[in-house]
Amino acid sequence: MTAALIGQIAWVAMVVGWYVIRYPFERRAKRRRVERSRRGHAETIRMLISFSGLGIIPGLFVATGFPKFATYGPSPLQTGLGLALMVLALVLFRLTHKALGKMWSVSLDIREKHELVTRGIYGKIRHPMYTAFWTMALAQALLLPNVVAGLAGLVGFGTLYFSRIGPEEAMMEETFGEAYRDYRRRSARLIPGIY
């Protein structure tokens, strides 16, 4: 089996793992009432761009090889690093969902009886789910030997992240006030000790 094929199989496994982790939380979230939401056209567009970069474009490449002009032969080291990042991304993804529990939401929502989660992985990182998605996008870039499909995740998720993080933090501060400001002072946004 070539490094390219291993990378593509691993990318599919990563997407399946992502869905398996998220599905029970998505079902549970549908049963909880949303008190306030910042969903709208801008959020829908951000989500579509992110989904295109992390799902549609790489899925098209894995299924058809398109766009062929951007394909290259990866090194085993590149694929190995991609596999390591894939595992890390899924572990982070699981830890974030476990810590959030009933407070999880796919979008910018405040649920009924919403609590500020600062336990588990959220004790050190304010947005570990975004850390997981950045790691997933990096894994995709390494696993898929195609410049367009590989980098689409970084571009797609990057668009979502940089356009959403400000409104999300503002909504959390508006909801939790001083408790969130204190939490923000003692936690890193994405990577402890760095950012």
Image (cartoon, rainbow, N blue to C red):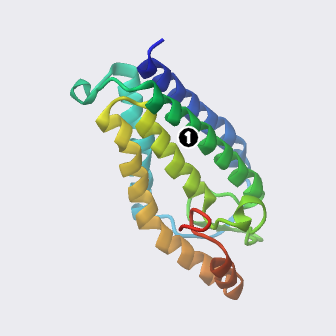
Where residue 189 sits: x, y (%)? Answer: 57, 68
Q: Is residue 15 left or right of residue 140?
A: right
Residue drawn at point x = 62 percent, y = 43 percent: 88
Q: Residues within 10 Å of mark 1 (few under 14, many from 20)?
A: many
Residue drawn at point x = 43 percent, y = 58 percent: 160
Residue drawn at point x = 53 percent, y = 27 percent: 10
- Furthest residue toward bottom: 178
Q: Toward the viewer: 95 or 57?
A: 95
Read off the residue under disc 1. 85
Say which quarter of the image contains residue 36.
bottom right
- Relative to 101, does residue 89 appear above or below in the rendering? above
- Relative to 153, does residue 68 appear above or below in the rendering? above
Q: Toward the viewer: 13 or 193?
A: 193
Q: Is residue 159 left or right of residue 118?
A: left
Residue 55 appears in the rendering: no
Residue drawn at point x = 54 percent, y = 71 percent: 168
Q: Amino acid at mark 1?
A: Leu
